[in-house]
Amino acid sequence: MVQATRVSKLLRSGVSTRGALALARAARAQALVKGRSFCLPEDLQAMFVPVLTHRVSLAGSGEMAGNRRQEAEAVIRDIVSTIEPPV
């Protein structure tokens, strides 16, 4: 999923390695809150938008404020919806 942000034509810069690590930590925390000692793909999908939206830059944009943040959220949601979780 992180790699998809890096190759998206809608984003100037995708998620960095630090962003991917933050996603992994948040997904593990999500699993713990749900009473599991392991992560599922659904945990990663659930945390993708809240953790990573502020870590990307839209193509052709300057600062991300107001509508730009909503546009970034839409792009991130689209990316996560197109990737099939592993079985």
Image (cartoon, rainbow, N blue to C red):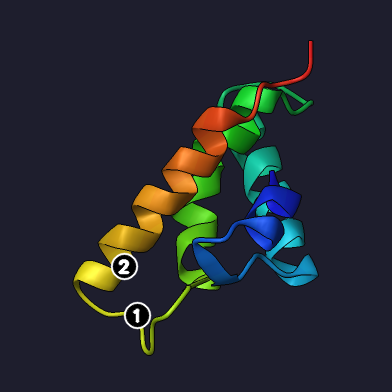
81 lies above or below 52: above
79 lies above or below 7: above
Q: Is residue 33 visible?
A: no
Is the Cβ of the residue at disc 1 closer than 8 Å to that at disc 2? yes
- Percent position of residue 16, x then y: 73, 70
Circle 2: residue type:
Arg
Q: Is residue 36 left or right of residue 76?
A: right
CA neighbours of label 2 inside 10 A, class few (<14), some (14 to 19), many (20+): some
Q: Is residue 34 visible?
A: yes
User: Looking at this rendering, what residue extends furthest in the left direction?
Assistant: 66
Say which residue label 1 marks: 64
User: Looking at this rendering, what residue extends furthest in the bottom direction?
Assistant: 62
Say which residue label 2 marks: 69
Circle 1: residue type:
Met
Residue found at x 54% / y 42%:
79
29 lies above or below 43: below
Callout 2: helix, strand or loop? helix
Using the image as rendered, state which of residue 42 and residue 65 is in the foreground.
Answer: 65
Using the image as rendered, state which of residue 51 and residue 83 is in the foreground.
Answer: 83
- Percent position of residue 20, x then y: 73, 58
Residue found at x 64% / y 36%:
44
- Percent position of residue 30, x then y: 59, 36
> Does label 1 or label 2 sit earlier along the sequence?
1
Using the image as rendered, state which of residue 36 and residue 77 is in the foreground.
Answer: 77
Callout 1: helix, strand or loop? loop
Residue found at x 35% / y 80%:
64
- Percent position of residue 7, x then y: 69, 58
Q: Is residue 22 left or right of residue 33?
A: right
CA neighbours of label 1 inside 10 A, class few (<14), some (14 to 19), many (20+): some
42 lies above or below 66: above
Residue found at x 56% / y 30%:
82
